[in-house]
Amino acid sequence: MDITPEILLKAYAAGIFPMAEDADDPTIYWVEPRARGVLPLDRFHVPRRLARTVRSDVFEVVSDRDFEAVIDGCAAPRRDTARTWINGRIRALYGALFDLGHCHTVEVYAGGRLVGGLYGVSLGAAFFGESMFHEARDASKVALVHLVARLRAGGYRLADTQFLTDHLSQFGVEEVPRHVYKRRLAEAIARPARWTVWPPATPVAGAAILAALGPETATQA
């Protein structure tokens, strides 16, 4: 079946998402986990040291400036494996969603160079995290903090991480059964949200990010 951006959005609304076995394999298959990773936006945990890094503005963080560079970073070989699930069809589909305003990036720069970031899909008040990368210490973590602050400030109700990993568990990500996830998903996509609560491609100060996460987070940095 020829997967279009419209079909891809319908798949997300139904609780499924695509993956590929390898960058060289043009095949795409659909995934619907029995247990879904969800990041509770009202209980996001920022370790104290990371909060200090965010407040220091050692990185410049923007959104939606360079989608191609972010997906290149996410698809690059990593220390533990040279394989990636991001193939040409995945790149094209999410690039089309980016052009339609349904795919977004958070980009982390140091000295003018992209050193980390993430991308994901926005549908109603639901955001589906797809992939992240880092080339500098804490860069992907800073991207995640900025993402959650933007989602909270923009009125999002659901942050989907697909799976629960050891890395994500430190931030409060939890697993929920499929039927619970689908109920939360239906409620979220029926509501409006605003990704552009802060202007895209414009740096957002760390102090504003921590303030959006609540007074407890803002004061621990």
Image (cartoon, rainbow, N blue to C red):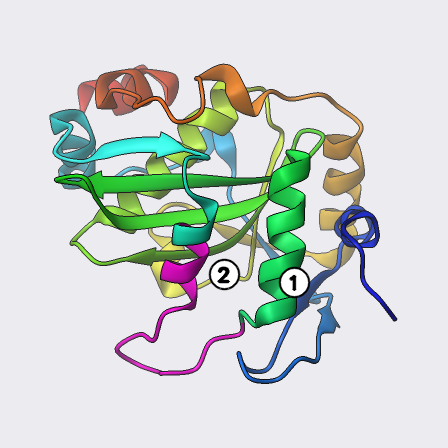
Is 6 rendered above or below residue 210? below
State the extent of the magenta-drawn residues as a range.
70-85
Residue 88 image-quadrant placement: bottom right
Is 126 rendered above or below residue 218? below
- Name the quadrant of the N terminus: bottom right
80 falls in the magenta region: yes
Q: How crowded is mark 2: few (under 14 residues within 10 Å), some or many (20 or more)?
A: some
Of the numbered discs 1 and 2, the one sitting upstream in the chain is 1
Q: Which residue is drawn at 53% across and 69% down?
A: 86
> Which element is circle 1 on?
strand
**Principal secondary structure, stretch drawn in magenta:** loop
Q: Which residue is drawn at 41% across and 42% down?
A: 66
Left or right for 10, reference 23: right
Left or right for 2, reference 157: right
Q: Where is residue 135 in the image (x, y as percent from the top left)?
A: 22, 58
Q: Which mark is residue 35?
A: 1
Query: Which residue lies under the disc numbered 2?
Result: 164
Amino acid identity at mark 1: Ala
Amino acid identity at mark 2: Leu
179 falls in the magenta region: no
Q: Residue 206 carries which label?
A: none
Q: Where is residue 111 in the image (x, y as percent from the top left)?
A: 12, 40
Instruction: Determine contact: label 1, label 2, CB under 8 Å.
Output: yes
Q: Position of residue 184 (x, y in %)?
A: 73, 39
